[in-house]
Image (cartoon, coloured by chain):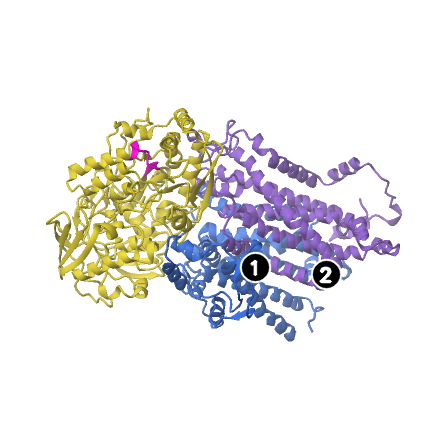
Chain colours: A yellow, B blue, C purple
Amino acid sequence: MGDNGLDLRYWQSRHVTRRRLLGGAVVGGATVAAIGLVGCKSKKTAVDGVTPAARPSVAAQDGTQDGQAKPGGILNVAMANPLPSMNPFGPSILSLYQGLFLGFTVFDHMWYVPTDTGVTELFLATKVEQPDPLTIIATIGDATFHDKAPANGRPVKASDIVASYKLFAKQLPIGFDYLHDVMQDVVAVDDHTVKITQNRPWAWAFTSSNAGSPWSSSILPEEILDKPDAMAKDAIGSGQWVLASHENGANVKLRKFQKFRQFAGTKSIAGQPYLDGIDFKLIADGAPALAAFKAGQIDTYGFNSKSESEDTKSALGDKIKVGSDLARDFFCLMLKYEPPFTDDRVRHAFNLLIDRDEIIQLMVEGSGLKCPPLPPAHKKYQLPDNDPDLQEYFRHDVADAKKLLDAAGFDYNQVIEFKHSVRSSDAQVSQILQQQLQRGGVQTKLVPEDLVKWFSQSLGTGNFHMTAFDHLAYEDPDLPLRFFMAGGGSQKNFMGYSNDAVNKAVLAAAGELDEAARIEKVRQAQKAVIQNWAPMLNLYAQINYGGRYNYVKGSISGRGSYGLFNRTTWLDKS
Amino acid sequence: MLRYTLRRLSFLPIILLAVSIITFVLLRVLPTEDFADVIGGSNATPEQKDAIRDKYGLRDPVFPVTVSGECERVVWYVPKCSLDGPVLALHPHSQYGSWLIHALRGDFGTTFNNNADVRHEFIRRFPASFELVFLSLGFSVVFGISFGILSAMYRNSPIDYGVRIFAVLGTSIPEFFLLTLLIVIPSYLWNYAQPSGGYIPVYDDPMHNLRLFLPPALIVGIAGSSGLMRLVRTTMLEVLRSDYVRTARAKGLRGRTVILSHALRNASTPILTAIGTAFIAVFGGSLVAERILSIQGNGLFFFTSTLSRDLPVIQFLAVYTAAVVVIVNLVVDLSYAWADPRVTYS
Amino acid sequence: MATIVERDRQLAPMDSWEIPRSKPWYQKLARLAADNPVGAVSFVIVVLFAVVGVFGASIAPYNPKELDASSQYLGPSSVHLFGTDKFGHDVFSRVLTGAQIDLKFGVIVMLFGFVPGVVLGVISGYARGWVDYVIQRSAEAWTAFPPLFLLLTFVSAFGPGLKTVEMVVAIGALFSGSRLLRAVALIEKQKEYVISARSTGATETRLLLRHVVPNIMPFILVGFSSVFAVAVLLEATLSFLGLGVAPGTPSWGADLAFNADNQGTKYPFLVLFPGLAISLVVLAFNLLGDTLRDVLDPRLRGSTGARK
């Protein structure tokens, strides 16, 4: 729910909403994860650009709130698209979908960082030391692979981890610059020790954009890594779920890995996962999925809108629980750094023309938050509401916008090409933006594109003037800020934009290992982004609503994708 | 008659070959975008693009025979080629060549999307499509013929007008509208939703199966029956006024006997043609029904493969559709002989 | 059946035929309209459609693309005749503007498909020989396939968009037109007046233009309306599937799809209005064609062909 993904093989332009994209694991797991009984404060209308403090205040649930877990049972979840293959690492970015799906289920990782706490939770690693800012030494505990050829249940070794990291880095030519850029080398010191050396201190090393991503850090057995055909057919890992069966990537069935390691860093996970398994049912469209949920054929569901959740709740009453969570994905308008957008005043004017409140009202009936340069889900790092730069960022004023455009000598006769993918949410946001810009006299022409084409050719190569889209749900503050950066050997900048002040600020934040100082530096980085009117204008992040039947217990909420591991879920069908 | 059948059947392979060549041209030669470009992104290195092409079997030339020399595509896809040396070049490995050789053995390749065997995927989805088409055609024929007869028998009465209005509405109201209403109205009025969870054969769970298939079959069937209705009516009208019917009446036969045994038999030729046409219409209409109701049949398979440019699937389904069309036409033609003894094929 | 036998006796006896006297055209038209009320109404609707298609954008009370966050999902009212959708668009304005897309589409298909098809058909019917054979076999091959299937294949080749749909539907119109007109041309060729005109020494072209064409005009009109109906239906279907107009463009099919997904089950009127618009227009074209055929085709008027 809210966890976005690029559905790179199927685009069903109308019926694919962001929730459908990453399939059942994310939808189901995130739904389970996100259900806290939260009263979402109603959105107050902004007055004079002041962001109302109406964030859903979630008491994060860690899965232990429902008491003693009862083992057993199968969870039924919907998946919207079949997995294109079982290979999490390739080819290239096309493996995103299955990489994340399998990364949360079949494969294990050394650590994971939940979004809300920002504290590294150790998984396979039992101890992590940083003797100096450039070195990370991880000691792993005892674990075994699933009992499938060629691993056949053998112990997990450090060399498996190293080989997996290296294969991933090789397969991904774009993105994950951490692995190419900051991480100098990763070696297996011995069977139980992994050593990572970095080129420079990096505060975000463990997070899910970098060495902690469930995608990039999946641990696969060495012997299978040079057999892409075998990898495509079956997923063999050491994670809590075994891939029991699938029908060409559809109707995936996972079963509990009985020999899953029973230690976890600092707290005991004895007995987890509690469920016997998870069954994913392929349901491609929203209406049948909702119908299946109402009929009890699936146990959890990510609603498309607040009213859908309310209607379903009134239909099913006490049988289900409905909760909400702030999404980590967010919409943005991206401008290419070329005339007319090279002039600060034009970018500032465009920002003034955007009425974020209207977008939120139209798209999600008001259930959303305006999005600063760093999405609001990253609570710790947010600027305070009364920050003057932030207030200016959110200000909406058509008259002032026109003044700025006039001062910049903007040519009102030009028609700017505005590309977007055919995903319905992208298309809708683009239509709204077109209308809003028109109020200031700016003319644009919408150009819809096939999702794959848009992603790899337009966005990926910077072949656009304007584009709007829904970002993935980044788990940490690193990636959203990196979009503004360029140079320093870092993230390729789609906008062709490079500003020294912004670059310095973002890099400074990334290199700051002390948390309190880092929080301040991230805030400064955001201010730098706003003051320089960096060409990516963030719009909004919505609030996702999910439902689950009452017998689904042990949910994790507010922890981001952490709940997707589904280890604490249990069923109480008594 | 046998010879006629065989002769008509002998056209089938030629037609299928032609269709397969045409689809190859449409899908692999004409598109201006390079598939590898789209998947890999313009920034991909030539090696990566070649790897992508290798993976999808797009490396070889499309056809076994090509015009050699430098060709560039000019306007309207008319290539301008400079010809020096031998004009035609033969290629041992070509996309079409290997496709054809495999197809003749029954191997239609693997899908681009999930590396699934195309034929296997087709067979998996066949029961759902078949049931939908079968039920729709059934409704079509039953409605079309019976209402057409009624309309002819009670000419210019309210029944007649009712049927004619119904027929025109059937061709005018879009199927997708009715199918959308099928989802929207029951949900609005009674919170009813069609069953989900994929295809369950009728013998496993008749309620689930019929709840899923009957409503769309009804709609698609009725939409396809309009032509049949009107044709039956017109034909019956002509036939009912003809001499031999009057003779039968004069002999004292009851009206119903007259109609069913004499009139219908003689009106059969155009009616059978109309049934053939209805079949094709239902075949196409089921695609929309599958799309709207998420029925995992071959129509939906074709649709999704079109969107993701899953070439092997599109090719196979194109050839399959062509085969269906030709065979239906053949069956209709042959049925003339069965229904009307005056028709003979030498 | 009593009715049929009685009807036989009711047919006008030969001696009551009157020599038709020339009436002014408007009276003839009025008579036609009175005799065929359905056809007359259809004609009016078709004209209305054309007018709305041309001027719709100017008549519409609201800008069909204008956002209005305070007016989402309103029911039909005096302010918004057909209610509003997710973006606060006035559905009535969108229906009016949507006519434009369909009209333009239909006109392009007719111009680049049907009209050349008619010409081709007449030539085919006249020339016979291998030209006729090739054209007719191609037409048969094309029309044998379900149109949606052809559309999807071309979309996979050339990408989605209105241009591709126009191309495919135009080709279909071409073949439909050619088959229709070929049949007609064949019949006409053998008619009395052609033979007699030829005997007076008229050249082939003069024959064609002066004599045959006016006589086949009615059939062209009939074909025109049915093909236009099919064109509108196909455009709506493809836009519904997301393969036609660009998103956001007011088009009945696309709007129907968008609204069905966005709270259509809660507010069915959002789905009803665009759907009814399509149905009404297609119905009108079909009925008009039917009426024209009834009026012009002698067979259906009774066995002697006399007008009542």
Q: Is residue A364 magenta?
A: no
Residue at figure coordinates x 70%, y 71% from the top left: B344
Q: Residue furthest left?
A: A131
- Determine crowd level at label 2: few under 14, some 14-19, many 20+ residues with C-alpha closer than 10 A: some
| Magenta range | A529-542
Work out whether residue A557 can be spotted: yes
Q: Chain of mark 2?
A: B
Nearest the camera: C250 or C277? C250
- In this rendering, the answer to whether C289 lies above or below B274 is above
Residue type beneath disc 1:
Lys
- Which labelled disc corresponds to residue B253? 2
| Tag nearer the camera, 1 or 2 | 1
- Which labelled disc corresponds to residue B80? 1
Q: Is C153 left, or right, of C40 in this rendering?
A: left
Q: Is A131 left, or right, of B252 in this rendering?
A: left
Residue type beneath disc 2:
Leu
Q: Chain of mark 1?
A: B
